[in-house]
Each structure stands twice: as C-alpha cells, then as structure tokens.
Amino acid sequence: MLETLDGPAVRLWARACLAALGRAREELDALNVFPVPDADTGTNLFLTFESACEGLDALDPGAEAEAGEAGAAAALGALAAGALKGAHGNSGVILSQLLRGLADEVGAAIRDGQPAGPRVLAAALADAAELAWQAVAVPVEGTMLTVARAAADAACAVVDGTNLPGDWTLEPTFAAVAEAARDAAEAALALTPSQLPVLGQAGVVDAGGRGVCILLDVLAALLGGYDPTRAVRVGRVRVPPRAVSAVSNNGAARTKPVASPSFEVLYMLEASEPQLAQLRSTLEELCEQGDGDSLVIAGGDGAYRVHIHVDQPGPAIEAAIRLGRPYDLTVTALANCSVATQSDNAWDGELVGAHSAESQSAGHTAAAPHYRAAPGRAVLAAAPGPGIAELFAEAGAIPLACTSGRPPNSAQLSRAIADAGVEEIIILVNDPDGLAAASAAAEQVHRGSSGARVAVVPSKAVVQGIAAVAVHEPGRRFDADIVAMTAAAGATRHAALQVAVEDAWTMAGVCHAGDVLGFIEGDVALIRSTLLEAALAVVDRMVSAGGEMVTLVTGDGLDEASGGPDGTRLDAAELVEAVRARVHATRPEMDVVAYEGGQSGWPLLIGVE
C-alpha cells in the first residue's frame, strides 16, 4: 500500500488510465450527445491523455527519480503540460485542466513541506475540479464538471471526518479517499440524464463524466493495492457498458435536431494574464451574441489552450492574433467532422508560419494530417527491432519504429498514414497496448477529407503480424484482404520469454531477479531458471494443441542469457536448434522457421500457426 505519492506511482496510474480510456473509447464516443452529438468524446479523451503520457515520457528521468513526493509533482506536471499541448475537443481541454489542478496542488503541498498523502490527494481533486469549472465560460450541470466536483467533495469529506451518505465514517487512507471519490463520481454520473435534458432525451449519461469515472476507478485500483495495468487488462477496472439503443448508429440520439455552430476552433496561445482576460472577454461576447458556444480556456503560466465552437472561425482567430501569435491551430467542421488547418484559410499569412514552427517543435499532431490520397494500398507494421523491420519490408510492408519498445502512438500513425499517401491503409501494431492508438488514428483519418480507407488488423504480437503480412495480397479487394490478414493473425498463438529484473508476484508464482518468465497469450504461464528451459517448456505447451508452423524471433541479449542444463552458454543458433529438435521430436509434421528480430526486452518470441 502507498503511504505517499511518488513518480513511479503516477507513471503507473497514467499508463493504466491510457489503456482504460483506449478500451472505452468507442463506448464513450457512442454516448456523446453534448455539447455536439459528433461521437468523438472518447477519442478526444484518449488522444489528450496519450499526449499527456508523451509529456511524461519526455520528462527528465532525474526529475521523476527525486525522492518520493517531488517525483510525483514532476510527473503530474509533465502529464498536465503534455495534455495541454495535445488537448482534443471540449472534453480534452477540460481534462488538461483537471490534470493541471492535480499537479498544482501536489506541487504546492510539497513546496510547503507537506507529505503527499491522502489529505493532499483530496485537496488535489478539489483543486482540479475548481480549475475545470473556471476554465469553462458557461459551466453546465450534468457534465464531466459535475462528476469531478462530486468526486472532490466526497474525497474532502473523508479527510475532514465528515459522515458520508449512509453514515460512513472512513479513516483518511489513500484507498478510502480514492474509493469515496470513485463512488461519488459514479453516483453523480447516474444523475446526469436528469440534470441535462439532451442526455435524458437520448437515454444516456454524460460521456465526459464517464471518462472521469474511469480515471478515478484506475486510481482506486492503484491505491487499493491492485496493479492497475493488470486490472485494466483483465477487466477489473469498470469500463462503461455499451451505449443504450437510443444512441446506436454511432451516437445519433433520438433527439430533436437543434442548430449549433458550424466549426470547432482550437489553438495554443502564449499571453499574459491581462491579454488572456481581454481574449476571454472578446470570445465571451461572441458567444453572448449567439455566434459561438462551448468556450473553454485552460492552462496557466503564460501558455493557454483555447477551445470554442463558432459559426465563423475568423473572429475567434483574429482576436488571438491581435494579442500575439496563436499556434497549433485546428479548425474542424462540426457538421461532418472534417478537419481543416490554417493553411486552408486566408485569415493571416503570418499565422501559417507560426503554427508550422511551433507545432513541429512540440512534436505533436493535433489532428490527422490533411492530404489527398492517391490510388494504392499500403501496410504499416510496427517493428520493435531492426531484423523485424527488414522482415516486414521484404514482405512489402512499411515498417514503423517502436520508441522505447512501445508501439507507435496515434500521432506517429497519423503521420505514417499521410506519408504513405494512398487510398487504402492497413495497420498492424503487433501489440495489445497499441490497438487503441491505431483505432483512434484511423478514426481521425475517417473524419478528415483525404479519401483514405484505414483498417486496423488486431495483431497483438509480432508473430501475428508476420502471419498477417504473409497472406497479404495487394490485388485482392480491400475488405477481403483485411479478412484474410485478420484470420491469419487470429489463428497464430503467441508466446514470449522475458528475464525478470526484480522479485515479483506473477500468475505462475513468485519470481526472482534473473528468472526467465514464459508468457503465453500475454500472461505469465511459467517460471524457469534459464532461457533454454523456458523456451522448451513454452513450446511444449504451445504445440500440444497442434498447428502447422512454429515461428521463432530471436532478440537482443539471447546469447548472453541462454544457458544449457549443465550451465554452459548457448548462442542464439544453438537455442533455436534445440527448440527445433524438441518440436520435431513430438510433432515431426510441423515446420520451424526462425528470424533474427533484434527486439530488446524479449529475448525470444514464439508463434504457432
């Protein structure tokens, strides 16, 4: 159990939140009927939190490694900054402000010498809710603002010793604060249809509020002693059920159509507080005149993210130009969700250069790149090692590099899709953690005006990707090619070996540093003392169910870590031959193929087709 927040805990929470939002993305999109029924709240929350995690990944390792609470403050600050730079949509901007509130309160407490314990967590939730309310020009009850405030009130009631509904009197522990916040958020979410008529008419709860509940559920899992990453993977974290039938057909609720602004405008602005106050006043006046709504301004310390829905984008952008140089600008047509950048408009010539330089330096793409696709088909395949990249390239796919062993994020995939420049794109991320980002990138392209069709083959391992590209036929119909590749990937059972770096509990028992873990279908199935023992044991289990071919992909470190039963060292070739002999001893009809993948962290990948 945690007694104080630290950097690793924040990082664990953030990655688990991203995974949970990825799992819930489509369901949250389907719930989205307010403020605009454009079915993108789940995608916006996921993309915003993905940008937040990018900011965390870019954090100087020394800053996060500082003792305890200082590391938590640095990590939360990096999350908030990343979310602000990459905020998508109304809900994403509000989410960035919630993260900023958490970071500000934890940082202030640490500077005052307070331990980052349960009381600070409750105060941070309260500050987050307050900042989010302040960011929205016209706050509305029944939204994610209401849910965040209810969670904060419940958390504060726990640490203040106030009786909660039902006469609960809870000790101010981390778990109690997090669980009270989560439960109150879920109760508040259930009331949103009665607070916001459009939700009641559609028969749904607020999509953004549901997203807040997911983040708090992951927090409760972490502070309650569970591994939140594992909890997300096995479904312990409560992800929203499918939207009710009233919002089937991708969120088109059975409500009376109402007039709404035509464009969503988003940009970053560096400004002083007086300049920001002037901009806020101008945009609020625009909304009061009926020419805009959904104004949200988030950020601080001179850097702000501005979001507004308007009938004409020009005035909202010109107001910012008068104050400085807005950048990272996107204009989205809400009617059909097509994306235009400032290069498609002639409001101000200087604005184009400002956007280009700033957005490129930030390393973030706010929306799918705008381009016109040419005839043709391309397969984009995530390749975590140079040998794997060569293998995919030889098969006619475009290999995508995996930074730090992680699959490409949505911004990287969007750029790769634009670079391919063809009408038909097939994506293989070859990692379960990358599927949500791939789906989000595909959704962004579909909302654009490039004319490209993008499909994601649900490959969860490199060996599944290898099987998929092996049956790829560019001359087939696009849909038929997707079906064939998906079937090949799904028919490939996958396993992998990893050397434990520390003592830990696993599904197969307790492992110690230096032990070899055998993963089958993503779960630890066995623990052995050497790679050879683990490889043979995994293969025995894999081929016992039959199959036609065994694929082995060797990685970095295999030569150094392999060991025979007598303690002698084995090189990669010797280990492969030992596995081949083992397979043929029991399944002589099965083929065994091996490739040098060069992936790090996973000495051996195994597939059985």
Image: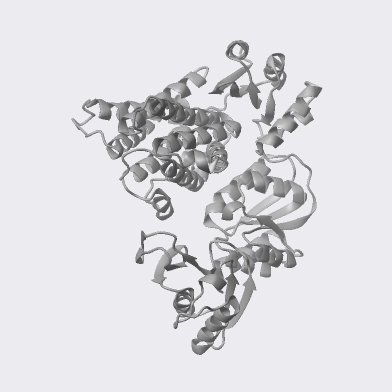
Residue 292 location, quadrant: top right
Percent across and percent down for residue 269 are: 64, 22
> With respect to residue 115, does 512 lie above or below?
below
> With respect to residue 252, does 278 lie above or below?
above
Percent across and percent down for residue 607 are: 55, 72
| Apparent side of residue 165 relative to residue 406 in the rendered image (left or right) | left
- On the rendered image, what quadrant is the C terminus found in? bottom right
- On the rendered image, what quadrant is the N terminus found in? top left
Could you tell me which residue is drawn at 26 percent across and 30 percent down?
158
Residue 534 location, quadrant: bottom left
Foreground of the two, 69 or 446: 69
Foreground of the two, 199 or 514: 514
> With respect to residue 282, does 77 lie above or below?
below
Residue 110 location, quadrant: top left
Q: Is residue 287 visible?
A: no
Percent across and percent down for residue 96 are: 52, 30
Foreground of the two, 190 or 462: 462
> With respect to residue 451, does 195 lie above or below?
above
Q: Is residue 481 visible?
A: yes
| Apparent side of residue 172 relative to residue 279 in the rendered image (left or right) | left
| Apparent side of residue 529 relative to residue 63 in the rendered image (left or right) | left
Could you tell me which residue is drawn at 68 percent across and 45 percent down?
414
Percent across and percent down for residue 549 are: 58, 78
